[in-house]
Image (tube, rainbow, N blue to C red):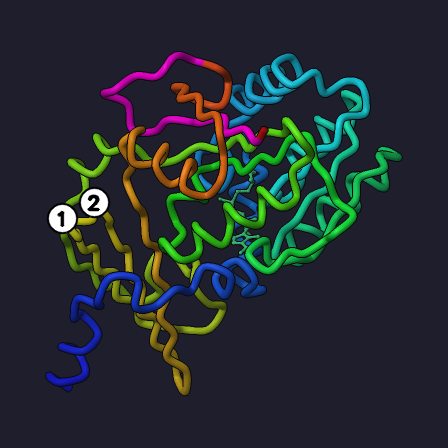
Amino acid sequence: MFAELSAIVARPPLYSRVTTPEMWADPHISAHMLAAHLDPLLDLSSYREEYLERVVAWLIDRFGLAGGRRVADFGCGPGLYTSRLARAGAAVTGLDVSSRSLGHAVSDAHREGLAIRYLHQDYLAYRDEDAAYDLVIMVMRDYSALSPDARRTLLRTVREHLAAGGAFVFDVDAAPAFAAVREQAVYAPSLMDGFWSARPYFGFHDTFRYEDERVSLDKYEIVEAGRHRTFCNWIRYFAPGELEEELLGAGFTGVEVLGDLAGAPYDSGADRFAVVATVP
Ligand SMILES: C[S@@+](CC[C@H](N)C(=O)[O-])C[C@H]1O[C@@H](n2cnc3c(N)ncnc32)[C@H](O)[C@@H]1O
């Protein structure tokens, strides 16, 4: 028992285990995620509605999306952005690994008669030689959840699918937010009110800081009768210069740093920021 508990709370090597797609694709977990996405007042899986509307308005204005411009939403979830951008006249593609969220997005589009192309697709493995998007968006700081290798793969994928002069717009967790991360260990039966499984379970939530790399890990060990699963949420907290270096190294030529996805000016004390990265 002591050895098992010690293993459960041990600090894993940085990025030794990545479970993001498994988490989003799990039928039980994704049902809870979808409920959080669709709550207009919550900033949990999607941003709250008031901010979301400002993001959409800014994207339409900044990138002139009304005239059939080609937009891809990487990790589109239930289609909160895809549907609004399609309504404004953009030609929209949404990619996601969660069939539950996509199911919601597809039926919404169908009901409204919106011609949105939805792909059940891991964006890290996306290849479409015919696609040339004017804009790729990735909303809700998903870039921060990726390992350095995955970020390189993602940037290559985005660049290969952008049209000449196209832009990649996304937001990230910022360095000041790392200061608020505290290492902790929490144990509870049915941790987080049954979020992780419909069956009885014991949940262990450990938070770790990786100082040198400015990364945090929230690790959830979920122990059920006959099943033990581990979920790792890594977050990299960026300074603008570090992100700029990654983008230029990946072949983007222009990088504009903003405060958020609604076009606010950059604030060096804020918990997040956004970038517009362009290709020639
Ligand atoms: C935090 S949610 C944000 C959803 C949406 N962008 C929004 O703001 O409403 C992240 C989304 O990315 C999806 N996702 C995570 N990893 C993915 C991957 N490798 N490929 C495609 N989708 C992924 C998840 O299923 C989830 O819908």
- Is residue 29 rendered magenta in the image? no
Residue matched to label 2: 214
**Mark 2 in CB contact with mark 1 (< 8 angstroms):** yes
Say whether residue 30 is left or right of residue 143: right
Asked if 231 appears above or below 116 in the picture, the reply is below
Q: Which residue is found at the position 50% from the left and 29% from the top? A: 277
Give the secondary structure at mark 2: loop
Give the secondary structure at mark 1: loop
How packed mark 2 is, by other alpha carbons closer than 10 Å (few <14, some 14-19, many 20 or more), is: some
Q: Amino acid at mark 1?
A: Glu
Out of 18 and 231, give the one closest to the viewer.
18
Residue matched to label 1: 211
Residue 215: percent from left, percent from top: 24, 48
Say whether residue 1 is left or right of residue 60: left
The extreme left residue here reads: 2
Q: Amino acid at mark 2?
A: Arg
**Highlighted range, magenta:** 264-279
Asked if 145 appears above or below 44 in the picture, the reply is below
